[in-house]
Each structure stands twice: as C-alpha cells, then as structure tokens.
Image (cartoon, grey):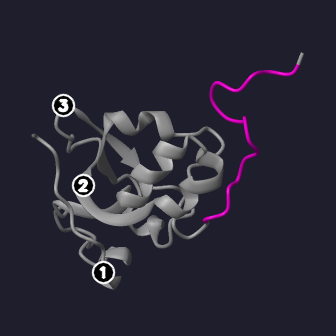
Amino acid sequence: PGGFAYRACDDKDRAFSAFKAGKSMPSEICGLVGGKKFDICVATNNFDQCLGGAVNRGNRPACSADHFCREDYMCQSLPADTPGAAKVKGIGFCSPTYFIFQMRIDNHATPWATTARASMGSGFGAAAEE
C-alpha cells in the first residue's frame, strides 16, 4: 500500500528528452530502481558480488529543491556518471527511504558500470584497520 508503480525507461527516457530548458519539469525521470534481481541480491547478503547486476533504470517521480517527494520517499540525485545527467542537473528521482541501506559512499552500482567498485567489507560500517 502506498507504493509507487513505475515503468521501464525507453531510449527517449534515458536521454531525458522530455526535459526542455525553460519548460516545467516533467513529473517523472528515468532513475535507478531495483526489481526482482535486487530482491534476490538482498537475500544473498553479498552486495559486492550482485548489486551491480540488480540495479536497473525505471521512471520514478522527478524531484528537485523546489519539487519534493512525498514524505516517506527521498529525493535521490542521479550518479554523476549517468549518461546525459548534465541535461537534468539539479533534478533527482523519488526513492523509497528503505533503500538507504544500499547506498555507499564509494559509489552506488549502476546499470552502465556493473562491476563492483569496492572490495568486500569496504564502505559504510566497515571495520577499520587497527
């Protein structure tokens, strides 16, 4: 209940073609989503090995500093290496707050860079060397 349905991104969505200078912001943007592969990945508890292949593109509600997500969602920016992201600078996508656990300070996995960018045990909460 209260979830968001989303549709897969097509080539126009991935190119952010609905975003035009001087026009109002569209209601949705091609952001990052999980899905069945993400659910399976979570069940393995081995994020470094599977997360890159579990993240997909999907249209989510668009958000910005002036257009907020609903109260139980957060506005997540697109990764800097998202193809075409410069066209939508300052605009993000609404993501459920329960996805916070998968966010990493050493970069989130993306569909265009599916190899793990961090070694096992690195990132938030990793044990420090003594």
Q: Left or right: where does residue 55 sit relative to residue 28? A: right
- Which three-letter amino acid code belongs to the residue tagged 3? Glu
Cα separation, mark 1 vs mark 3, equals 28 Å
Residue 8 sits in quarter: bottom left
Give the residue displayed 32% in from the left and 42% down from the top. Answer: 75
User: Which image quadrant: the N terminus?
Assistant: top left
Q: Which mark is residue 62?
A: 2
- The residue most toward the left is 1
- The magenta stretch spans residue 119: yes
Residue with the mark numbered 3 = 71
Q: Left or right: where does residue 111 sit relative to residue 3?
A: right
3D distance between C-alphas at marks 3 and 2: 14 Å
Question: Which amino acid, mark 1?
Answer: Asp
Mark whose residue sits in front, 2 or 1: 1
Whether residue 74 is situated above or below residue 47 in the rendered picture: above
The residue stretch that appears in magenta? 114-129
Identify whether 107 is placed above or below 33. above
